[in-house]
Image: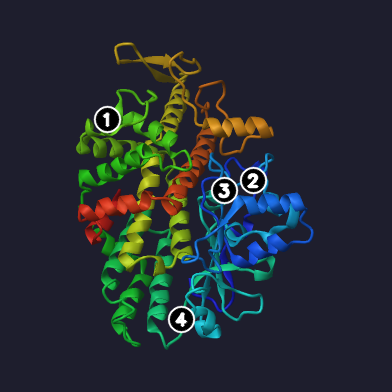
Amino acid sequence: MKVSASDVALRYALRFHCLADRCEDSCCIGWRVMINQANYEKIRRAASLPGTERRRFLESVELVEKGERSIESYAEFKMRKDGTCPMLMENRLCRIHALLGPKYLCHTCQTYPRRIYRVGDMAFEPAMAENPRTRNKIYASVDSPVPLELSATASCPEVARLLLLHEDAVEIVPFDRRTLGPLVCQPGIDLTTRRPYGRYLALVRERMNGMIRMQQLPLEKRLLCLVYLASRTTAILNHRLLEPDSPVLEGEALMFDDPEWMLEVSRQFDTVKIPAPLLFTVVRTLVKSDEEGRDRTTLRELTRLVLAPYLSKGPWIRLARPSAARMDDLHPEELIVGYRSLKERMYAAAPERFDRYFTSFAASQLFGKWQLESTDLLTHLIRLLVELAVYKFYLFSHPLLHHALDQLEAHREGGAGDRRKPTAGGETELVPAGRGTDDQTIDPVPSRHRKRAKETGSVSTVHKPATGKGEPPPCATKGEFLDLLDRVAVEVVYRTTSLLEHGFLLEQIERKLKKAKLMSPAGAVYLAKL
């Protein structure tokens, strides 16, 4: 992958179209939405806006305090008590978009879930680049000569589907910026020879993007080679120290053109064992985040479901809120041993599927998020590995998927499959598949999504109801299992990404890893092998 002189995008980002009221979730809930000054004034003065609607808008926003106010963060919406945007109508459409059109939306709403980076010579617009009021959001006009790169965030359910379920999702293709409407870009990167840091950063990024796509190597080995490259170049790739000519850095990056060399590099990590406290630290942080009520996207329900096999005697005991006390009852060694067993079984059922999920997500992040958001290249990579580790834990441990495998294996053997029901004494007994229980429900569809589906008369393909109230989806064929796996993968990735990228979770996990001295090359190796 090379930084092109023209605008380029990941294919899935060009396929994206907002589902609006047909989406199973809503990006109009739980955000802090800032309004730029230009759009605030445009809406306030819009001649076509009725007086009652203008008053509604002005009553729904508040100006940012003068000391913090800028042209980008000029005002913000006052969210309702339930966390919804005051412009969200009962039909789940935006009032501003419906009355005035997309050009009147604030920059966050115009852009999300897309990510657009400027890649080129910042000298084309030096005044905007150097002005602190405009540095963070630089507008790219249709006539601007600076190339753009387009991707998207998987915190949107539709983006997660397009990213995970298509084999060509992360192909790099040219695009016409005029088809996107108003463009709001992330801070750019200067690739000129005057500033060698950007040029060498682009070189290492190009190599990392190529490495993650080398399908002839197992995903784990590709991730380990990324760790090796990042750990070798982090000290050199410093914008304060980097010389215009750095043959050492170029040599380190160019070695990874050869798959055989990558395989040899990865072999040195074959005997490395993951320390039990690593997974415990990550899972403990997930539970703590759940307890503190910071999961905007009902990650709580997912955490409860996935922790069941580890905190109970049977995988189908639906737990109450997993508490710190219950986590303390679980030994770190028991957790890692249990995870290895579940991971081995689940991965063997669909290795190509899991490789595609994780490769596509990693490729999208490496392309769509430049290292500028992290202090150094290794930290940048560790953050990606943390996201992958969380997704792996949820997917490989998911009871719905293991129950589906039970059913599939039972059908192959001529049986009907069974599941477990808790008894009064805390033990478990087998219950034939197809029978419900009075004290137990296993529902992959969150209640708020089910209610929304009932109101709108539609249910997303990601959240198809189970067959019968409280029953897991039936799974008699490999095709049915793969369909369920796709739906669960999309749900896990979009829900978790919402909290990792827009909440506190990634920051919390990073802080815990730093305390355990795992924000290091060794910690990165452990995460890659998790």
Relative vertical location of residue 251 with respect to residue 46 in this rendering, above or below: below
Relative vertical location of residue 402 with respect to residue 497 in this rendering, above or below: above
Residue that mark 3 sits on: 27
User: Depth check: 64 or 136 in front?
Assistant: 64
Select label 4 or label 3 by which is in front. 3
Sequence-wise, the earlier of marks 4 and 3 is 3
Q: Which amino acid, by three-letter code, is at mark 3?
A: Cys
Q: Name the colour scheme.
A: rainbow
Relative image position of residue 486 (x, y in whole percent) = 52, 41
User: Depth check: 153 or 391 in front?
Assistant: 153
Sequence-wise, the earlier of marks 2 and 1 is 2
Select label 2 or label 1 by which is in front. 2
Sequence-wise, the earlier of marks 2 and 3 is 3
Question: Image check: 67 left or right of 78?
Answer: left
Residue that mark 1 sits on: 326
Sequence-wise, the earlier of marks 2 and 4 is 2
Residue 520, picture quadrant:
bottom left
User: Depth check: 45 or 388 in front?
Assistant: 45
Residue at the (64%, 30%) spot, across then down: 454
Residue that mark 2 sits on: 88
Residue at the (41%, 78%) spot, across then down: 198
Select label 4 or label 1 by which is in front. 1
Camera sees residue 121? no
Relative image position of residue 155 (x, y in whole percent) = 50, 50
Relative image position of residue 374 (x, y in whole percent) = 36, 65
Q: Which amino acid, by three-letter code, is at mark 1?
A: Arg
Residue 102, picture quadrant:
bottom right
Question: Image check: 467 left or right of 440?
Answer: right
Mark-to-mark CA distance, 2 and 1: 39 Å
Residue that mark 4 sits on: 191
